[in-house]
Amino acid sequence: TQLLEQSPQFLSIQEGENLTVYCNSSSVFSSLQWYRQEPGEGPVLLVTVVTGGEVKKLKRLTFQFGDARKDSSLHITAAQPGDTGLYLCAGAGGGSSASKIIFGSGTRLSIRP
Amino acid sequence: KAGVTQTPRYLIKTRGQQVTLSCSPISGHRSVSWYQQTPGQGLQFLFEYFSETQRNKGNFPGRFSGRQFSNSRSEMNVSTLELGDSALYLCASSLVVGANTGELFFGEGSRLTVL
């Protein structure tokens, strides 16, 4: 069974600090997505990474896909209260079914003003 | 382009009742998948529809069912509601089944509370 483990589960930091969230698996994924979900809302796609070693930047957010395509990290620089939310990683194993997309358990991030 | 629309956003039911949730995907998207999200279990796959056909089903009892219409809109139904069915039900659409790249576009969800 494929699993995606996210760490930490909870993170509360002060505005302006930096943080990194990790998403790890023993399985290889053809692509990996990061989503952010705010309370009472659905997850919103932030980025897709598909190539081992790939780095993508979205303003203050930096996403990296591991060389072996088994893990990923999300780094936020100078966190702001608007970054608060549940961050989910999801790995796609290839093939053509949403049932094959594995979601991590999430990292709940809280940024204190 | 309008996003994924789910209705109703919130609903309260009692045990034993049934509920129907609706999802309108992004225009042009033909694949709709449904997920149940709870604090303890995270996001769990319910089922996936493409061209009015159920392509895959997750590990949920037969009380959970769904369908997709010719315009790609989808409904899911839960019969004989149990307290444990309280959750946020999310619908996601994609261009093709599973979108190959894994990218899903979620609606805002339907928050079901069973009393």
Image: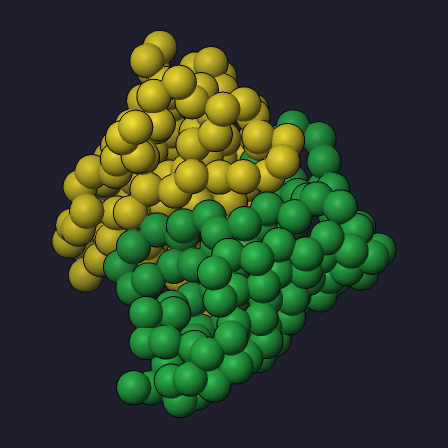
Coordinates of residue B104 in the picture (x, y in percent): 49, 39
- Residue pictured at 65% horizontal, 66% vertical: A73
Q: Is residue A89 above or below residue A18?
A: above
Pick the residue in front: B17 or A50.
A50
Residue A29 in view (yes/no): yes
Left or right of B58? Residue B34 is left
Q: Is residue B3 above or below residue A89?
A: above
Pick the residue in front: B100 or A54.
A54
Q: Quadrant of residue A68?
A: bottom right
Left or right of B75? Residue B92 is right
Pick the residue in front: A44 or B59.
A44
Residue furthest to the bottom in view is A14
- Residue pictured at 26% horizontal, 35% vertical: B5
Residue furthest to the top in view is B70
Residue A110 in view (yes/no): no
- Residue pictured at 64% horizontal, 31% vertical: B100
- The chain painted green is A
Left or right of B64? Residue A63 is right
Coordinates of residue B9 in the picture (x, y in percent): 19, 47
Coordinates of residue B84 in the picture (x, y in percent): 35, 60
Q: Chain B is drawn in which colour?
A: yellow
